[in-house]
Image: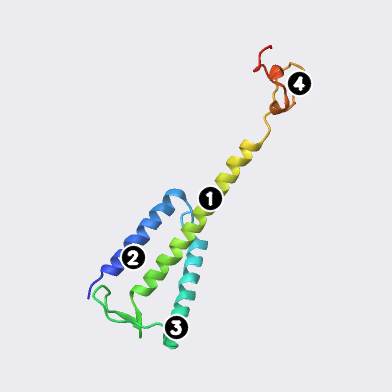
Amino acid sequence: MTFVTVAALLASIACVAAVDARYRLFAWRAPLPAALVLAAGVVFLLAWDAAGILLGIFFREPNAFSTGILLAPHLPLEEPVFLLFLCQLAMVGYTGCLRLLQSRTDRLGAEAQVETDTDTDGDAGVPVRHRTRAARGTGGSR
């Protein structure tokens, strides 16, 4: 009996939680809804596993890396821990992608706004990009 797989999964959960905490992406942003989403995901995937086990699709072979502790026939202790990790990673990844896309959209939107000149040379409010070089004072005289 070895706890290598469980230890690796718990370490991975801790690393994803650290990223989540640093950027306030999922559980650190809204703990109760995040807990409900994680619980729903794990329950759904455990039901999926149970259906696969009953149909003979999923089965467990003994190996040197798992604990050998079974929660049900062919359902090792590592499975719900892995499913928790899978759900957490998916949600942190999803919310992280949303944050990146929103940041990019905000940045591009700010850059796309037309700059206006507010000086008193008579063309105040005219977008800078529509003025001639001479009017902007960048072309000099030719």
Mark 1: few, some, or many residues within 10 Å (few <14, many ≥20)?
some
Residue lying at the far bottom of the rendered structure: 55
> Within 10 angstroms of label 3, few (less than 14), some, or many (20 or more) residues?
few
For mark 3, give the secondary structure.
Answer: helix
Kindly tell me whether residue 54 is visible in this rendering: yes
Residue at the spot 72% in from the left edge and 24% down from the top edge: 131
As drawn, the residue found furthest toward the front would be 142
The spot of residue 34 in percent (x, y) is 49, 62
Question: What is the spatial separation of the Cα atoms under label 3 and label 4, in whole angstroms?
Answer: 72 Å
Q: Secondary structure at mark 4?
A: loop
Amino acid type, label 4: Asp
In the image shown, does 132 or 95 lie closer to the viewer?
A: 132
Q: Which residue is mark 3?
A: 52
Q: Position of residue 32 (x, y in %)?
A: 50, 62
In the rendered view, tell whether residue 21 sits above or below residue 124.
Answer: below
Cβ atoms at labels 3 and 2 below 8 Å apart = no
Q: Quadrant of the N terminus?
A: bottom left
Q: Of the residues shown, which amino acid type is indicated by label 1?
A: Arg
The answer to which of marks 4 and 2 sits earlier in the sequence is: 2
User: Looking at the image, is 41 positioned above or below residue 99?
Assistant: below
What separation in Å lies between label 4 and label 2 (alpha carbons)? 64 Å
In this rendering, does residue 31 appear at all?
Answer: no
Label 1: state its secondary structure: helix
Residue 102 position within the rendered picture, expressed as x and y whole percent measured from the top left: 57, 48
Name the residue carrying label 2.
Answer: 9
Tell me if 64 is positioned left or right of 49 in this view: left
Q: Amino acid at mark 3?
A: Gly
Q: What residue is shown with label 4?
A: 123
The residues tagged by marks 3 and 2 sit, at their Cα atoms, a distance apart of 22 Å
Q: Which residue is mark 1?
A: 99
Chain-order first, disc 2 or disc 1: 2
Task: Report whether 52 appears left or right of 118.
Answer: left
